[in-house]
Amino acid sequence: MKTIDERTLDRIIEQITGQVLLSLQQELATTESPASAPITAKDFVQRVQPVLSAGADRLASTLGIAPTDKSLAHAIDHTLLKPDATQDEIAQLCFEARKYGFASVCINSAHVKLCADLLKGSGVPVCTTIGFPLGATPTDVKVFEAQQAIRDGASELDMVINVGALRSRDYELVRGDIAALARACHAGNAILKVIIEAAFLNDEEKVIACQLAKVAGADFVKTSTGFGPSGATPEDVALMRRVVGASMGVKAAGGIRTYADAQKMIAAGASRIGASASVKIIQGAEK
């Protein structure tokens, strides 16, 4: 995989930011008064925060902060996304999440109601996936799926971007896709994590994907679905953290099976881990 030096990375970020913000200013000029102030990436982040009434304080204090060993469980999305997962397996997942105090349970949207009932009063949120695992779903369909998931009890949503559109350089489609999901999530006091499926992208495309997610109002960027050619790598996590800064979370997911794996991702800049081997990871931390 081709790597890029620091100067080139900074130049790419600057160019993409300028292009995206210019596009947004032109779009908003048709709907807002001429006296409206120019929009910036920082403005988007500031606009998102007041909407997150239930989770705003937690987001503001933890998005870009790497967990310590003592708080590692609180940074892991306890995950079960296999298509043949049974209700008993989902119940076991929720039991383990209660026991260890994981950041959330992450499941397919068909299981949201069940998890919301099983986790009621536990303080463990329900996270679900949108447009999963391919991302090649019309925006309206993703929005409907997100709204239904929120009604069913989800408060964190992990959406997959339209990877083909990104690789086709249709950046406005990708930005609009993410922005529509961000609006739907924040209207329901839910957090949006954007899966860029890094294994399909080169470094320049990863930078662009993260920058679009940031400008569109997402709360996290996430490395992988776990169903792609490969999962998270420390290199990808470090690149993503550099692009989004401390104002957003970075979730590493896919192939993280041990405490050592998790520590590598945290050291690279991850503030959230997605794993199905969560219990094993925590037991490794205790040892």
Image (cartoon, rainbow, N blue to C red):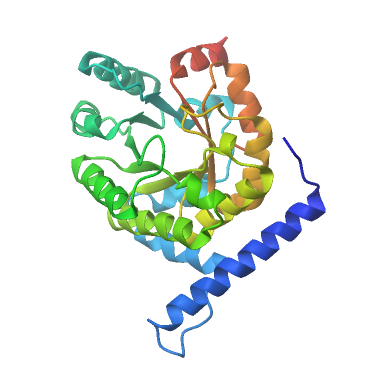
- The residue at the point 48 percent across, 63 percent down is 172
Res 120 seen here: no
Q: Position of residue 173 (x, y in %)?
A: 45, 59
Q: Which of the 4 image quarters holds residue 69?
A: top right
Q: Can you say which quadrant of the picture contains the N terminus?
A: top right
The relative height of residue 56 versus residue 157 in the rendered view (above or below) is: below
Residue at left offset 66%, top offset 31%: 234
Residue at position x 31%, y 56% in the image: 184
Which corner quadrant holds the C terminus? top right
Q: Is residue 256 visible?
A: yes
Left or right placement of residue 77 versus residue 128 in this view: right
Q: Residue furthest front?
A: 168
Observer-nearest residue: 179 or 248?
179
Q: Is residue 67 above or below residue 57?
A: above
Horizontal placement of 215 versus 240: left or right?
left
Farthest residue, direction bottom: 34
- Image quadrant assignment for residue 85: top left
Q: Position of residue 9 (x, y in %)?
A: 74, 52
Residue occupying the point 35% across, 60% down: 51
The percent position of residue 28, horizontal first and vertical second, equals 44, 77
Q: In this rendered view, identify the residue nearer to me: 102 or 151.
A: 151
Asked if residue 234 lies left or right of residue 286, the reply is right
Q: x%, y% of residue 243?
A: 64, 51
Q: Quadrant of residue 98?
A: top left
